[in-house]
Image (spheres, rainbow, N blue to C red):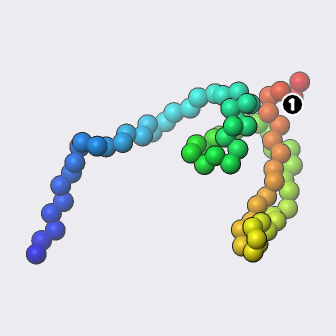
Amino acid sequence: MHTRIVRRLDNIVWIPKHKFEFVDEDVLQERVDNHEFLTDIIGCLSSIGDIEPVGSDGSRQKRDIQIMIKEDFT
């Protein structure tokens, strides 16, 4: 028995290699806890909290950070 690999070109989802789009703060707020998008933020890191356990059994961890964005500088 032999394995046969056939490349299919129909039904391919093309994901752009590089894409960015600047958005307003209200759009960022809508993305909180929405894991459909990855969001890069440009700013200055102003504080980093301690690592804390989360969840009912504490098996996951989180760390709060604060980032100063453009409006915070003025």
* Residue 61 location (% of width, % of height): 74, 65
Residue type beneath disc 1: Asp
Badge 1 density bin: few <14, some 14–19, many ≥20, Cα 10 Å:
few
User: Farthest residue toward the top?
Assistant: 74
* Residue 63 location (% of width, % of height): 79, 58
Residue denoted by label 1: 72
Secondary structure category for the residue under label 1: helix
**Where 22 falls versus 7 (above or below)?**
above
Determine whether, in the image, residue 36 is placed left or right of residue 16: right
* Residue 3 location (% of width, % of height): 16, 68
User: Farthest residue toward the left?
Assistant: 1
Q: Residue at x 64, y 46 (%)?
A: 34
Determine whether, in the image, residue 2 is placed left or right of residue 58: left
Determine whether, in the image, residue 56 is placed left or right of residue 2: right
**Where 57 falls versus 54 (above or below)?**
below
The quadrant where residue 15 appears: top left
* Residue 52 location (% of width, % of height): 82, 65
Q: Residue at x 18, y 55 (%)?
A: 6
